[in-house]
Image (cartoon, grey):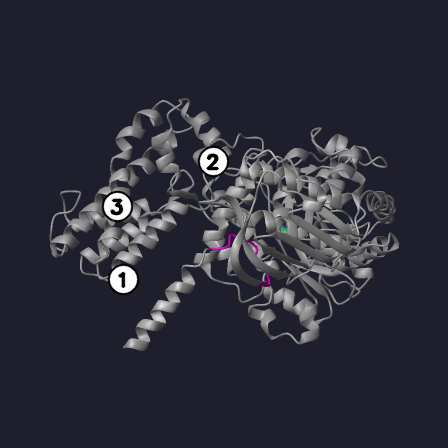
C-alpha cells in the first residue's frame, strides 16, 4: 500500500513540473533549476559564422521578444550578452533539402547559449527560445533547460493553393512567419489550377493576363516572397499543375488543349475535364520555354508538376489522341499521362531540377529521381518507396477537410503501409506537407483554416515518433496559438471581425457563445450538401466561414463529461462546470434570436441556435435525474413529452445545419444516455 502511495506521489510530482510550451517538442529536453529573467537590457551576441539572414533573424527575434513581453528592449553591450549565439558554418545560399537544422540551447539563470553546426540551426533554436519565454511571478523568464534538437524529417511543408481563391503576398508572408515559428521548412505554392493562373510569365503573358482576373504575382513579387521565406529557413517549391487542373492555361493558349476551345477561367468548385494535349509537339515546345523561365524564377532544386486527377474525358473523346495512343501501344490514359510525364521530367531535369508530382505520377517508366507526393494514403507512399522513389505524405494532412488537430496528429508518415519498409526504403520517406486547398478560404479566413492545427502537423514531422500525447499536444497548441498573434496572424481575431459583420452590432456575446461550439462540416460535405454548382466568386461571409475548424469549448466540455462519468458522478467540480456551460447554452437562444432575425447573413443559423438551447436544457435535466438517482427512462423530459421526442431531437440536431455541426451534442447525449440507464455511447 505504502509503495503505491509513494508511486502516485512521485508521479504527480513529475506531472506538476511546469509545462514547457514547446511545439514542436524538441528531440531532447532536460529541465534545470531556476530561470533566466528577461530584462529590458536583454542582449544577443553573435560569434562564429554569420550571414545576412542570421543578422536579420536576430533582429526579428528581438522584435518578437519585445512584442511578446510588451517591454521595449535597451540591449546591454555585447560583453554582457544574455544570449550567446554561435554557428560553425553558414547555410547554403539556396537552401537545400536535408541541410543541417540541428541546434543546442542551454539556458541557466546566468544566461543562454545557442550553438549550431549551421546558421539554419540557429534560426530554429531562436524560435525555441521565444516559445520558452513565459510570464512568471518574477516577470518574464525562460526556465533553465538544456535542449538538443534536430528534425525527424527533412521535408516539413505547407501547401497553399492560391488558385481557387487568390491569397495576397502579405497573407502568405505572415503564414511564412508562422511556419518558421513551428520549424516548417517548405512552402509548396500551388500556383495554377482550373480556377486561376497566378504567376507572371514574360514568355507567355496570356497565362496571367487571361487566366487570372488580374490576380497574380509579378516576378518581382515572387522573388520578394522567396527571399522572405529564405530568411526564415523556408524553401519555396512552385507547383504548375498539368496536364489536368489546367483550364486557366488554356484560356490564353487553347492550342495546348485536348479539345477545341474557347476556354474560360473555372468559376465553380470541381475538377474540370480540360487537359493539356500530350500528343502534340507544340505542347512540349511551349513547356520547354515555360519551364525554363520558371526554373530561373524559382531557385529551389525541386519543381512540382501536379499530375493529379486527370479524368481523361478529353483524351478519350479526341480521335487524334486515340489514334496516337494506338500507334504507340498505349492501353490507358494512365499510359498517356506517363508518356507526358516522361517528356516533362526530361525538361525539368534539363533545367537542373528534380520533378515532384502527386501520387498519380507514379509509373514504372519514370526515373527514380522523381518525388511522389501522396494525397491518397500511406499505401501509395510505401509503394513508391518500395519501387525506389522518394516520397512525401499529404494524406491525412488536408487542412481543408476540417479535421481536428488530434486527428491530423495521429497520422504518421511511417505508419500503416509505410511501417514495414526496410531501412533503405524508409530513408526515401522525406516527410510531409499539410495542404490548404482554397475552395473555402479567402485572405480573411486563411489563417484560421491553417492555424493553429498546422502546428500539430509540424510537430508530427519534426519531433520524435513517440511524441504522441494528445492532451500535452493541445496544451502546447494553445500556447503556440497565442504566440502566433505576436507575429500578426489573424487566426483568432478574424472571427471576431466576421461575427461583427454578420451581426451588425457591437455586442456579439451571444453569437460568440454559438460560434464557440460549432464546427464546419467535415471532409467534402460542404460541397456535397450544396446541390447547385458552387461559385468561387460568392462571398464567404457565413457563420461556417468565420468559426474555427475545431471547437476548443466542445472538446473541453466533452472531457468534463468523461471526467464526471468516470468518477461515477462523484466529481462535483466537473458537475458544477458542466452545469454552468449548459445553463449558458440553454439561455443563449433567447438573447441570440433577435440578432439572427435582423441579419440576412445570420438567418440560416436560427435552428442551430435553438438546438443549442434545447441541448443545454436536456443536459441540465439529465444531471438533475442523475443527482436524484432516478432514471429518466419513463419520466418526463425537457420537452414535457415522452423520451421518444428527445431521441428525435438528437437525430435532428445531429444533422448539419447551415453547414455547421453542433459539437456539444455528443457529450450531452452521453449524459442523457447515462441518465436513462443506458451506456454513454
Ligand atoms: C489533390 O488533392 N488532387 C492533390
In the picture of the structure, the residue carrying the numbered disc 2 is 546
Binning the other alpha carbons within 10 Å of mark 2 as few (below 14), some (14 to 19) or many (20 upward) gives many
Q: Is residue 307 visible?
A: no
Q: Is residue 315 visible?
A: yes
**In the image, residue 176 above or below residue 21:** above
Determine contact: label 2, label 1, CB under 8 Å.
no
In the depicted view, which residue is nearer to us: 63 or 266?
A: 63
Determine contact: label 3, label 1, CB under 8 Å.
no
Q: Is residue 27 magenta?
A: yes
In the depicted view, which residue is nearer to us: 536 or 616?
A: 616
Q: Position of residue 285 (x, y in %)?
A: 88, 46
Element on which disc 2 rests: helix
Residue at 71%, 62% (x, y): give it.
362
Binning the other alpha carbons within 10 Å of mark 3 as few (below 14), some (14 to 19) or many (20 upward) gives some
- Quadrant occupied by the N terminus: bottom left
Q: CA distance from mark 2 to mark 1?
A: 35 Å
Badge number at residue 488: none
Viewer-side label of 3, 2 = 2
Binning the other alpha carbons within 10 Å of mark 1 as few (below 14), some (14 to 19) or many (20 upward) gives few
In the depicted view, which residue is nearer to us: 491 or 285?
A: 491
Q: Is residue 541 magenta?
A: no
In the picture of the structure, the residue carrying the numbered disc 3 is 649
For the magenta stretch, what is the residue range? 19-28
In the depicted view, which residue is nearer to us: 424 or 266?
A: 424
Q: Position of residue 371 (x, y in %)?
A: 73, 60
In the picture of the structure, the residue carrying the numbered disc 1 is 566
Amino acid at each position: 500500500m505504502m509503495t503505491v502511495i509513494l508511486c502516485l506521489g512521485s508521479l504527480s510530482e513529475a506531472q506538476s513540473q511546469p509545462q514547457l510550451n514547446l511545439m514542436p517538442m524538441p528531440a531532447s529536453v532536460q529541465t534545470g533549476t531556476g530561470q533566466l529573467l528577461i530584462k529590458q537590457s536583454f542582449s544577443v551576441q553573435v560569434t562564429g559564422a554569420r550571414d545576412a539572414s542570421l543578422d536579420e533573424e536576430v533582429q526579428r527575434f528581438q522584435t518578437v521578444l519585445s512584442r511578446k513581453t510588451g517591454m521595449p528592449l535597451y540591449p546591454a553591450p555585447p560583453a554582457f550578452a544574455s544570449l550567446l549565439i554561435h554557428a560553425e558554418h553558414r547555410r547554403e545560399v539556396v537552401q537545400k533539402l536535408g541541410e543541417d537544422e540541428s541546434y543546442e540551447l542551454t539556458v541557466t539563470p546566468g544566461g543562454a547559449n545557442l550553438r549550431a553546426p549551421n546558421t539554419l540551426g540557429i534560426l530554429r533554436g531562436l524560435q525555441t527560445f521565444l516559445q520558452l519565454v513565459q510570464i512568471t511571478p518574477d516577470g518574464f523568464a525562460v526556465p533553465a533547460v538544456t535542449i538538443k534538437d534536430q528534425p525527424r524529417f527533412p521535408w516539413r511543408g505547407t501547401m497553399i493553393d492560391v488558385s481557387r481563391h487568390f491569397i495576397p503576398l502579405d497573407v502568405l508572408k505572415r503564414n511564412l512567419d508562422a511556419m518558421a515559428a513551428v520549424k516548417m521548412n517548405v512552402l509548396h505554392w500551388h500556383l495554377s489550377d482550373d480556377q486561376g493562373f497566378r504567376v507572371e510569365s514574360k514568355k507567355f503573358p496570356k497565362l496571367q493576363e487571361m487566366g487570372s482576373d488580374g490576380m497574380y504575382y509579378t516576378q518581382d513579387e515572387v522573388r520578394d516572397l522567396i527571399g522572405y521565406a529564405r530568411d526564415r529557413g523556408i524553401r519555396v517549391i512552385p507547383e504548375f499543375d498539368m496536364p489536368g487542373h489546367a483550364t486557366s492555361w488554356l484560356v490564353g493558349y487553347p492550342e495546348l488543349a485536348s479539345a477545341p476551345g474557347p476556354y474560360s477561367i473555372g468559376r465553380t468548385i470541381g475538377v474540370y475535364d480540360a487537359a493539356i494535349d500530350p500528343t502534340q509537339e507544340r505542347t512540349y515546345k511551349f513547356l520547354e520555354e515555360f519551364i525554363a523561365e520558371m526554373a530561373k524564377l524559382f531557385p529551389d532544386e525541386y519543381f512540382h508538376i501536379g499530375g493529379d486527377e486527370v479524368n481523361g474525358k478529353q483524351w478519350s473523346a479526341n480521335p487524334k489522341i486515340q489514334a496516337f495512343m494506338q500507334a504507340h501501344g498505349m492501353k490507358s490514359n494512365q499510359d498517356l499521362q506517363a508518356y507526358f510525364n516522361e517528356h516533362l521530367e526530361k525538361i525539368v531535369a534539363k533545367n537542373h531540377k528534380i520533378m515532384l508530382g502527386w501520387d498519380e505520377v507514379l509509373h514504372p517508366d519514370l526515373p527514380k529521381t522523381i518525388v511522389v507526393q501522396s494525397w491518397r494514403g500511406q499505401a501509395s507512399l510505401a509503394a513508391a518507396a518500395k519501387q525506389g522513389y522518394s516520397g512525401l505524405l499529404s494524406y491525412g494532412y488536408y487542412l481543408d477537410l476540417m479535421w481536428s488537430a488530434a486527428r491530423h496528429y495521429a497520422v504518421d508518415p511511417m505508419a500503416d503501409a509505410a511501417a514495414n519498409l526496410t531501412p533503405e526504403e524508409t530513408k526515401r520517406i522525406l516527410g510531409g506537407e499539410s495542404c490548404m486547398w482554397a475552395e473555402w478560404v479567402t485572405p480573411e479566413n486563411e489563417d484560421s483554416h491553417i492555424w493553429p492545427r498546422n502546428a500539430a502537423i509540424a510537430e508530427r514531422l519534426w519531433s520524435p515518433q513517440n511524441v504522441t500525447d494528445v492532451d500535452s499536444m493541445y496544451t502546447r497548441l494553445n500556447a503556440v496559438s497565442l504566440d502566433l498573434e505576436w507575429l500578426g496572424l489573424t487566426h483568432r481575431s478574424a472571427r471576431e471581425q466576421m461575427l461583427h459583420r454578420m451581426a451588425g452590432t457591437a455586442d456579439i456575446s451571444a453569437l460568440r457563445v454559438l460560434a464557440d461550439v460549432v464546427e464546419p462540416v467535415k471532409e467534402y460535405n460542404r460541397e456535397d450538401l450544396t446541390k447547385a454548382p458552387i461559385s468561387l466568386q460568392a462571398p464567404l461571409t457565413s457563420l461556417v466561414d468565420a468559426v474555427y475548424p475545431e471547437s476548443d469549448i466542445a472538446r473541453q466540455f466533452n472531457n468534463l463529461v468523461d471526467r464526471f462519468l468516470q468518477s461515477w458522478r462523484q466529481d462535483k467540480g466537473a458537475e458544477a462546470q458542466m452545469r454552468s456551460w449548459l445553463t449558458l447554452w440553454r439561455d443563449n437562444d433567447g438573447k441570440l434570436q433577435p440578432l439572427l432575425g435582423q441579419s440576412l447573413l445570420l438567418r440560416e443559423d436560427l435552428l442551430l441556435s435553438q438546438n443549442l438551447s434545447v441541448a443545454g436544457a436536456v443536459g441540465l435535466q439529465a444531471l438533475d435525474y442523475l443527482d436524484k438517482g432516478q432514471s429518466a427512462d419513463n419520466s418526463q423530459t425537457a420537452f414535457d413529452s415522452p423520451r421518444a421526442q428527445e431521441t428525435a431531437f438528437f437525430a435532428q440536431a445531429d444533422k448539419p445545419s447551415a453547414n455547421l455541426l453542433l459539437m456539444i451534442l455528443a457529450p450531452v447525449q452521453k449524459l442523457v444516455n447515462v441518465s436513462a440507464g443506458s451506456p454513454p455511447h
